[in-house]
Image (cartoon, rainbow, N blue to C red):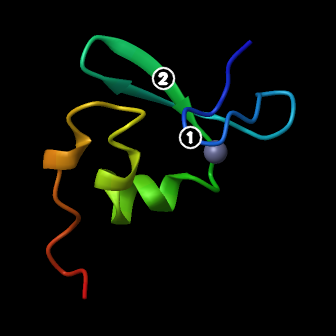
């Protein structure tokens, strides 16, 4: 069973997008994808190292 790394919804409940990070294959749902894009540090407790990832430069 695959689950969203952030909200833990399963692939039975919502489409999941595969992401490859470091040596792991993890999954994220579309509802959580904006957080990964715009506030990557907010997911640092799920994916260690994201606290060092900056959002795109044109963010307000
Ligand atoms: Zn999610």
Q: Please identify the residue farthest to the right as the structure is shown.
A: 12
- Give SS at disc 2: strand
- Determine which quarter of the picture holds residue 56: bottom left
- Give SS at disc 1: loop
Q: How many marks?
A: 2
Q: Is residue 29 above or below residue 19?
A: below
Between tags 2 and 1, which lies in front? 1
Q: Please identify the residue farthest to the front as the structure is shown.
A: 45
Q: For marks 2 and 1, give the CA distance.
A: 10 Å
Marker disc for residue 26: 2
Q: Residue at x 79, y 41 (%)?
A: 14
Q: Which part of the image, by quadrant, shows the C terminus?
A: bottom left
Q: Is residue 16 above or below residue 34?
A: above
Q: Quadrant of ligand 1?
A: top right
Disc 1 residue: CB within 8 Å of ligand 1:
yes
Residue labelled with disc 1: 6
Residue 35 location (% of width, % of height): 46, 59
Front residue of 58/45: it is: 45
Image position of 57 (left or right of 32): left
- Determine which quarter of the picture holds residue 3: top right
- The first of marks 2 and 1 along the sequence is 1
Image position of 40 (left or right of 28): left
Image position of 16 (left or right of 20): right
Disc 2 residue: CB within 8 Å of ligand 1:
no
Q: Residue at x 42, y 33 (%)?
A: 46
């Amino acid at each position: 069973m695959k689950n969203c790394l952030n909200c833990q919804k399963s692939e039975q409940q919502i489409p999941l997008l595969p992401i490859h990070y470091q040596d792991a294959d993890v999954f994220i749902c579309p509802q959580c994808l904006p957080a990964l894009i715009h506030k990557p540090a907010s997911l640092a407790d799920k994916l260690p190292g994201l606290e060092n990832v900056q959002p795109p430069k044109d963010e307000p």
